[in-house]
Image: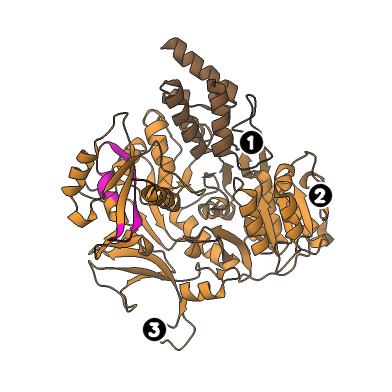
Amino acid sequence: MPYLLWHYVTDTARSHPSRLAIDAGGRSLTYAELDELSDRVALALFTAGVGRDCRVGLFLPKSVDSIVAMVGSLKGGAAYVPIDPSAPAARAAYILRDCQVSALVTTSGKLSQLGESLGELTSLRLVLLADEADAPIVRMPVMRLEELEPADATDRLWPSATEIDPAYLLYTSGSTGDPKGVILSHRNAMSFVEWAAECVGVRPEDRLSNHAPLHFDLSVFDIYAAFQAGASLVLVPDRIAPFPVALTKWIRDERISVWYSVPSALIRLLLRGGLAETELYDLRTVIFAGEVFPVKYLRDVMDCLPRAEFLNWYGPTETNVCTYYRVPRPLDQNIKSIPIGGPCENTDAVPVDADDLPVGPGEEGELLVRGPTVMLGYWGLSKKTGEQLVENLRQSAYRDVWYRTGDVVRREETGDYTFVGRRDHMVKSRGYRIELGEIETVLYQHDSISEAAVVAIPDDEIGVRLAAVLVSSEDKTIEDGEIRAFCAARLPRYMIPEAYVFRAALPRTSTGKTDRTALVSELTRQAAGPH
Amino acid sequence: MSLTDELIQFIQETLVDDPGVTVDEESRLIDTGLVDSMGLEQVIHFVERRAGVRLSDDDVVPENFQTVAAIEGLVERLRGGA
């Protein structure tokens, strides 16, 4: 029985060695090759004394090598830590230091970028380079992935990790302050992967695209659901990803059958990628997560892909995925937002009131989650972990742990949940409770608005003032007055934004979500400036 | 300042995190990850505003954005064809 994530690779390598595991444009690996190359990484780590209770940092562009390094780290008994390759060196260095990595897989260029901060990484024992370029001189041993020795049968005595050992850490940006490392065990990841592979019905002939960055939890599905089913993982090349027309053609030419991304990636294909004119014959399943999909765009995307099944998955990184919704066809004409559905099998997800008691139909509450996919905790942050993973809510006679998502959902009469917003997007202005997501939902209903973010600018007088940052879908300018009137017709007076700012695009975080923190600080600065 | 210089300055200031990287006309923008999806949107907006051209979906393809020189070439063609 597979109980560690890398077992998926070795199992398929044994039963179907010549099946394609990874396809990345110029380079591809069969399962046998992936198994063999990741053995080399594991052996190099093992030889350097890197194994259980160690972390391996991955700071390199997404590539076949990144995936080999992931599997190799796991075989060696270590947990891997993918870092945003476009992150500034200071942030990367913070993460490497925070979780005390013992080994680092990177490129020569990034190693130079890290520069002096490497000196502070006292835990670092080995650097593995994925490229051929000249590397700076560092005090720890440096090896090239290309030159690693093969591991023979006697070498393959990998440390016996257990399924409750950490498999990887994903650093998420906290709303305030430093990034925090979410620790997921093999069991956490595999419970999710096995549920997900069954939900989608992943088959060996499937080709799963990997669009999300590797430090984003969406990637976990792409990679390991492919490996679990003996299917192929197809990495979206960096040179294609930014270009909507090229990306649509890539999906067609690469015969992608399962696509998983944030809604905004699909909206770009719809608005600027010629999705309506391109026949994506092989695409059978489209999964979206990470943000609310505005109904008007989802409807159009579904029309462009009449044969595909659409799934809305929901779950903070801390829970993998905890609820799901199979989007019905046709979409109800009157529907205003797409539900996040109900709990995944083998998972509890319950909206509760202020006393942590389940809410009734039609009511809203914070979603609490319990199940095998819920994280082990935050790296080195026991207090924060204790606040989010709460024990003994029901005075049970055994240790019973629930994760507080901080997300507010509504329990519909149908039993489905609808995402209402972040608890911390809930603001008070003039004493009224305001959920910013609700205002955004209204703005998205306007025909000329393609993107909208409402932010709360701190204000001494009334608590906060609301500002709407908007992207116009056409080339015309929209009068503030028109938008204000549009909101006034649909929202209570206290929820109507005071300021309207038009932008070419909304700032996004490295994981593709709207960067609200950046918007708030920018608009706060402007508000504080001369009037 | 020419469009080329302005574009180089814009990319250097808004998209380059690494102080060791200097952008010039022939720097590889896309393969190197210097310009990603978000960065590309900013570059397109900048070019449209500064050069007074409109880019169609079919102009936004990898060949036209590999280097600053390639972007310049695209702008020339759009101006010539307009």
* Residue at horizontal 20 percent and vertical 40 percent from the top: A481
Q: Secondary structure at mark 2?
A: strand
Residue at mark 3? A394
Q: Is residue B11 above or below residue A392?
A: above
Along the line of sight, the residue nearer the viewer: A251 or A61: A61
Q: Amino acid at mark 2?
A: Met
Q: Is residue A479 above or below residue A349?
A: above
Residue at mark 2? A143
What label does residue A413 carry, if any?
A: none
Question: Does mark 3 fall on the same chain as mark 2?
Answer: yes
Give the spatial CA distance, label 1 vs label 3: 53 Å
* Chain ID at mark 1: B
- Note whether residue A6 is visible: no
* Chain ID at mark 2: A
Give the spatial CA distance, label 2 vs label 3: 53 Å
* Residue at horizontal 36 percent and vertical 31 percent from the top: A276
Q: Amino acid at mark 1?
A: Thr
Taking the image as shown, residue A295 lies to the left or right of residue A194, namely left
Q: Amino acid at mark 3?
A: Arg
Question: Does mark 2 fall on the same chain as mark 1?
Answer: no
Q: Secondary structure at mark 1?
A: loop
The colour applied to the residues of chain A in this rendering is: orange
What label does residue B32 carry, if any?
A: 1
Q: Which residues are magenta?
A: A440-464
Query: Which quarter of the figure is the C terminus of chain A placed in?
Result: top left
> Residue A452, percent across and down?
33, 45
Along the line of sight, the residue nearer the viewer: A397 or B52: B52
Q: Which chain is brown?
A: B
Q: Quadrant of residue A130?
A: top right
* Chain ID at mark 3: A
